[in-house]
Amino acid sequence: MLMPSRKHVVLVNPSLVGFEYGMQRDFEGEIARLTGAEIVPAPDRRLPRFVSRFARPGTRYESLIRFVPKVPFRVEADVLWVILMGPEDFPLLFHKGWDRHAEKTILYLFDTFERQVPTLRRVLASARWDITITSFPAAVPMLERQTGRKWYAVRQGVLPERFFPLPEGVEPPIAFTAYGRRLPVVHAAACIFARKRGLHYDYTVAASMQPELDPRENYAIYAWHLRNSWFTFSWPVELTNPGRVVGFSPLTCRWFEAGASGNVILGAAPKDPAFQQTFDHDFVFPLEYAAAHEKMNDQLGELWQNRYALRQQRLRVYHDRAADWTWEARIREILQLLDNL
C-alpha cells in the first residue's frame, strides 16, 4: 500500500453507466487498492424536472446552474481524488463545502477536448483544486491557455488483471476486431476479406447497453474479445471524428487496451509525441485507408499470412513495456506530483 499514513478518499459518481466507464472504475479501484482509499459515492441531488433537463453540464443552458441553490456536503480526507471521464460528469455542481475538509484535492480527467472548456471552467470554479490532470499530454498548452492554471499530464492505462495476452502457443480464435470509431472503407474491406476466408471479424454492433449493468461487466467482455483476436483496427480521434478535437491528437485508452492484450494493431497512430515514447515507433501497422478495395484486400491478405511473426513482435513489446501501461504506474506518478507540491 502506498502512503498509508494519509487518509485518501475517492469520490465516485454512482449514476454513470455505459461501457466507456469501465476504465474509470478500474482506475478508481486501483487508487483504493494502492492507497487504502475509502470510496465515497456522490450524493444524488434530486432536482425538479425542468431544472435537471436544462441546467446541466455540457448543454447550452448550463449557465443556469448558478441559479440552482446548493446544498452542503462534507467529505473529510487528507487526499481527495475526483476522477472524471469528462467535466460534464462532475456530480457536485449543486453541492457546496465538500472541499473544505480535504487537505489536498486531485482532479483527473480522461477527456479534455476544446469543446469541453466552458464546462471545465465551471468545474474548476466550483472548488479548490490543488492538482489538475489531463490524460492527454498534447492538450496541456491549450488547457493552460484556456483556464489560466497549471496542468499536468498523466497518460491513461489499464488494469493488467483485465487486459493481458493469451498464453504462449494459444492461437486467438478471432481474426479481426474493431470497437468504437471506425473508417467505413476499411470496415467494408475487412468484412469481405473475413467472409471470403471463413474468418470471424468482431466489431461493435450495439448502440447502447443494459443500463443496470456495472460498466465493468461490459468492459470485461470487451477485454476477452481483444485478448482472443489476432488483429484490431484503431484510429486517431481526429481521423474518424474530426469535430471532436481540433488542435491536438489525443492518446486514448484504446491503445493501452490493445497493446496489453497482445494485439497487432492496424490503422494509424495518434500524432502526440507521447505515443512513440509510450509504445514503439512502429507499434501500429499503417493501412492505406484511401486505397482501392483490391489494394486493401491485398494488404489484409499479406498481414494475415504473416500473423504469427507479427504477433511475436508485438508480444516482445508487451513484455518490455507492459509495466508502464498500468494504472498502478499512473497512480505512482500522481502521488509523486502530490509529494512535490
Image (cartoon, rainbow, N blue to C red):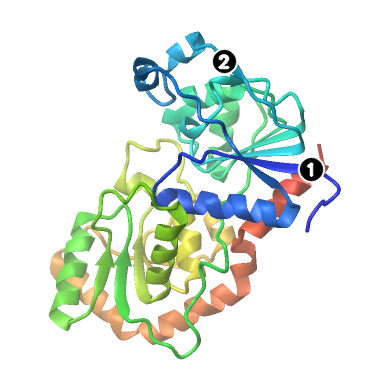
Relative to 294, residue 146 above or below: above
Q: In this orientation, which residue lies closer to the viewer: 206 or 184?
A: 206
Left or right of residue 239, residue 14 in this image:
right
Residue at image coords 56%, 27%? 92
Labels 1 and 2: the sequence-earlier one: 1
Mark 2, other Cα within 10 Å: few <14 / some 14–19 / many ≥20: some
Tag 1 secondary structure: loop
In the rendered image, which quarter is residue 70 located in? Answer: top right
In the displayed image of the protein, which residue is found farthest to the bottom?
Answer: 169
Residue at image coords 53%, 11%? 69
Quadrant (top left/top right/bottom left/bottom right) for the N terminus: bottom right
In the displayed image of the protein, which residue is found farthest to the right?
Answer: 5
- Disc number for residue 70: 2
Q: Position of residue 332 (x, y in %)?
A: 73, 54
One can see residue 307 in this view: yes
Tag 2 secondary structure: loop
Relative to 29, residue 128 above or below: above
Q: In this orientation, which residue lies closer to the viewer: 8 or 296?
A: 8
Residue at image coords 39%, 76%? 228
Amino acid type shown at disc 2: Lys
One can see residue 330 in this view: no
Left or right of residue 54, residue 326 in this image:
right
In the displayed image of the protein, which residue is found farthest to the top?
Answer: 67
Quadrant (top left/top right/bottom left/bottom right) for the C terminus: top right
Tell me the CA gap for discs 1 and 2. Answer: 26 Å
Amino acid type shown at disc 1: Lys
Contact (CB < 8 A) between labels 1 and 2?
no
Q: Position of residue 180 (x, y in %)?
A: 32, 54
Relative to 91, residue 314 above or below: below
Identify residue for label 1. Answer: 7
Q: Position of residue 62 (x, y in %)?
A: 42, 18
- Disc number for residue 31: none
